[in-house]
Image (tube, helix red, strand yellow):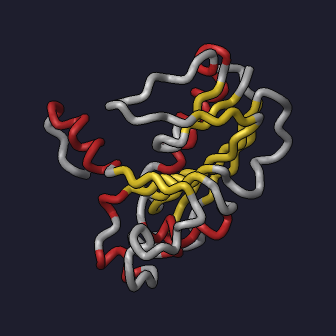
Amino acid sequence: MTSQVSSEAGEALVGEQRSAAPTAPRHGDEKEVRRLDRVIIRFAGDSGDGMQLTGDRFTSETASFGNDLSTLPNFPAEIRAPAGTLPGVSSFQLHFADHDILTPGDAPNVLVAMNPAALRANIGDVPRGGEVIVNTDEFAKRAMAKVGYDTSPLEDGSLDGYRVHPVPLTTLTIEALKDFGLSRK
């Protein structure tokens, strides 16, 4: 059994069933696949964004392939911290591999940042060259200003040392659920 991390949107694939062959490139784009013996992924966003639920679901899928794992849920210290602020960031870290895992890991290979506060609070833990998936829908001027970004870190070169994957996650989710008549919340 081998772990794979694809650079496209940082998707992590683990297990014999999925690692047998890389998936085909989409829309003619080449898809780089790197085989890793372990992966540490951290999902981060506002408390209430579902980071604990996302981490739990990702953990369940990872375990279903027979991988060993260790998790580290991280809740904000403040009760009802204002949305989009550093004290309100919640995260869930998962370390998984095809061999024994003893800790949830120190530095995530992959960071999924749902907003500017999540990026700011967690980017210092990601080693240079790490994968950073960013929900671009939440990077409005007001949200960036709340956490001290004068310019967008997605455009100012401050993330040049990372493999950044800008993804409009909110837009994609709303589009996927449009037939259900649900509100944005």
Q: Which residue is pictured at 59% across the width and 34% down the height? A: 33
Q: Is residue 121 left or right of residue 175?
A: right
Between 91 and 1, the one lying in front of the other is: 1
Figure check: 22 above or below 163? above
Circle count: 0
Q: Which residue is pictured at 77% across the width and 51% down the height? A: 105
Q: Which residue is pictured at 35% across the width and 59% down the height? A: 136
Q: Which residue is pictured at 50% across the width and 50% down the height? A: 51
**Quadrant location, the N terminus:** top right
Q: Position of residue 106 (x, y in %)?
A: 76, 57
Q: Is residue 145 left or right of residue 171?
A: right
On the question of residue 69 being in view, the answer is: no
On the question of residue 139 being in view, the answer is: yes
Q: Position of residue 169 (x, y in %)?
A: 34, 48
Q: Position of residue 88 (x, y in %)?
A: 49, 69
Q: Is residue 79 left or right of residue 168?
A: right
Between 7 and 50, the one lying in front of the other is: 7
Q: Position of residue 168 (x, y in %)?
A: 32, 51
Figure check: 87 above or below 135? below
Which picture quadrant has residue 137?
A: bottom left
